[in-house]
Image (cartoon, grey):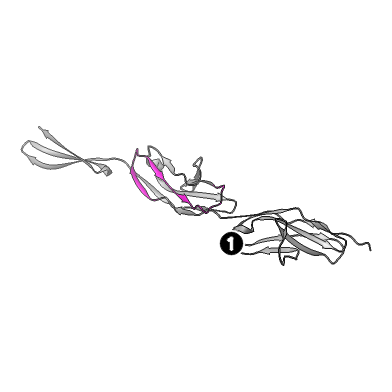
Amino acid sequence: SAMVSPVITGLPQSQAVKVGTTATLSVLATGTLPLTYQWQKDGANIAGATNATLVLNNLQLAQAGVYTALASNRLGSATTLPALLTLGHPPFFDEHPQDISVLAGADVELSVKVSNNTTPPVQSGWYKNRKALPGTGAANSGLILTNVSHLDSGSYYAWARNSFGSASSRSARLSIFNPTTKLLPLALTGWNYDMVVEKGATGQRQVADDAI
């Protein structure tokens, strides 16, 4: 039968992979045997990478780049189209929102911090009681709630996602209290008495003298 130069029939695929994990690149080729292979990164041969499959373990950032494979026989060679290997870190929260209790009508800010190691771009947002809150901002932006009411009570957490994975912060409980007023007699002498007014959870105290 006629001898045939190598023809690439299966290409390696571009990948986005977490640092520290494994990537596998493969090539398929036809042609007169024997066929040999040589993998290249950024145009330079990779030592010992002479199989149809290239396995890269414990990947580090320096291994990101453009990978190609060269299939050869005695009649010639053929090179694959490039496959881009992108490496990065998935999101990780360094700081989490804290439980908070406030009076109705107050303004509240829940804050988080995404690790600086996180590879951009990052999508993020907030959930309340396991339901997504639309339009809740970019990574490291706090959730600001104004003039809160009992309808804002609940469990809140942040999420972040990039090409390499996703993460959620711990949940924080927001409790809302309505201001209450209690009258407590301090002393009673004849028809004159003093009263103290206590304002709910504000801790404010006001003393008033009334006469009948």
Q: What is the x, y in percent for residue 19?
A: 59, 59
Instruction: Say which residue label 1 marks.
Output: 20
Q: Quadrant of residue 195?
A: top left
Q: Who's the residue at 63% across and 64% down the image?
A: 57
Residue 41: percent from the left, percent from the top? 70, 58
Image-based side of 98 in relation to 115, left or right: left
Name which residue type carries label 1.
Answer: Gly
Q: Is residue 32 above or below residue 211?
A: below
Closer to us: 52 or 209: 52
For this view, does 75 lie left or right of residue 184? right
Q: Residues within 10 Å of mark 1 (few under 14, many from 20)?
A: some
Furthest toward the top, the residue is 212
| Secondary element at image label 1 | loop
The spot of residue 106 in percent (x, y) is 35, 39
Farthest residue, direction left: 190
Q: Which residues are magenta?
A: 98-122
Residue 90 falls left or right of residue 170: right
Residue extending furthest toward the right: 1
Q: Is residue 156 above or below residue 60?
A: above
Magenta span includes 99: yes
Total numbered labels:
1
Residue 7 at x, y percent in the picture: 83, 57
Q: Residue shown at 46%/50% (left/top)?
A: 113
Task: Give the main secondary structure, helix, strand or loop, of the magenta stretch.
Answer: loop
